[in-house]
Amino acid sequence: MAIQNRIADFHADMTAWRHHIHENPEVAFEETQTSAFVAGKLSEFGIEVHRGLAGTGVVGVLQGEGRDTGKTIGLRADMDALPMQEENTFAHASKVAGKMHACGHDGHTTMLLGAARYLAETRNFSGTVNFIFQPAEEGAGGGKRMVEEGLFDQFPCDMVFGMHNWPELPPGKMGVRPGPVMAGADRFEITIQGRGGHAAQPHLGVDPVVVAAQLVVAAQTLVSRGLSPVECGVVSITRIHAGTAFNIIPNEVRLAGTVRALTPEIRQQLEDGLRNLVRTLPPVFGATGELVYHLGYPPTINHAEPTVIAAAVAAKIAGAENVLGDMGPSMGAEDFAYMLNARPGSYVWLGQGGSALGCSLHNPRYDFNDDVLPMGASYWATLVETVLPRVA
């Protein structure tokens, strides 16, 4: 691996930063300590610091020492933790009950800080790099809010890049591909209204439980019979609430779930199909249906040219044989999608371990692999020097 020597020199510092952030997790839009820590480090490195976007967001701005070409780049890391109890017992385990860094955002923040330190020391580039430390990725849409509050108006970026650790990939490997890499994720609630009564006399009422069961099965055909076999989508009913006793047919059933798709077109098709199903199926049984549909994160779609650049830089760092260009997309969601909808860019995966070194994302025993911190920071630094080459 082509790790920057200077970054390797302060690997121990990065590990200490990461452990500090891991010990003090903060969830969406509550990242006050984390943003203060990030801002403090950027100031210490001599980087111009801006705070307040999306409440707890931080943006560091650094000019290269070469002739100003007017070119700009944005590098984004997420800072928030998850509302879950950590089960690890190592020294840097979470000190906050019910909160933990179970998705590696502590590592993401640290790797971008490492790149910022290196680039502030060397400034071997021309133009401007914006270090974007984003709050509230975990479902609360911090990326969307930063964009809406003028991120790219205040801090222009010709291109913007993101990175996420991936436990399924071994350390030393990276994944990058053009097109869809993460799904859009929506959620919904459905209410089936019937006519309750005695469980011994179902013929005198309209059983909404039976109607709900039919709807759950029918919803699966939106993908299995509604999409081409080579297209991807997910419709999952994840919650069903009904009834209070074994001998009472309830008046209503409430269901909830998620819709996921890799393209805006399939996303719309699945939403339309679910709406039609809820409107037409319950009346067949004498019931009524109501759907409340919540649009969530859009699909994360990499742009072609920035992805070619990201893949070339990944090959410099990891070696071409360790860069996977054929990784299938994930049906998980990521609010970096909002930044990619606003500016060209690319999102890459960084291998961090697999089961031999830890657990999957969002597991109470997960921990970021400190061994890959220099690799991630070197990727960021080399990306800047590649996109913004120094001009005398």
Image (spheres, grey):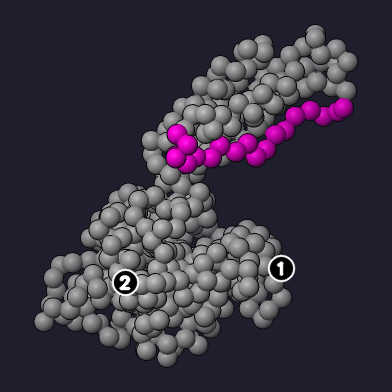
The answer to whether 221 appears left or right of 97 in the picture is left
| Secondary structure category for the residue under label 2 | helix
Cα distance between the residues tagged 1 and 2:
36 Å
Quadrant in the picture for residue 43: bottom left
Q: Can residue 201 be found in the magenta stretch?
A: no
Tag 1: residue type? Glu
Seen in the picture, residue 138 relative to 32 is either above or below; the reply is above
The residue shown at (39%, 72%) is 321
Residue closest to the eye, 173 or 14? 173
Q: Earlier in the sequence, mark 1 or mark 2?
A: 1
Q: Can residue 237 be found in the magenta stretch?
A: yes
The residue shown at (80%, 9%) is 203
Residue closest to the eye, 383 or 13? 383
Q: Position of residue 363 (x, y in %)?
A: 64, 62
Q: Which residues are magenta?
A: 228-246
Quadrant in the picture for residue 66: bottom left
Residue closest to the eye, 132 or 351? 351
The residue shown at (47%, 86%) is 11
Q: Is residue 19 visible?
A: yes
Crowd class of label 2 (few under 14; some 14 to 19; many from 20; radius 10 Å): many
Determine which residue is flagged by label 2. Answer: 313
The residue shown at (72%, 33%) is 241
Q: In the image, which disc is placed on residue 87?
A: 1
Q: Position of residue 318 (x, y in %)?
A: 39, 76
Q: Are marks 1 and 2 in contact (CB under 8 Å)?
A: no
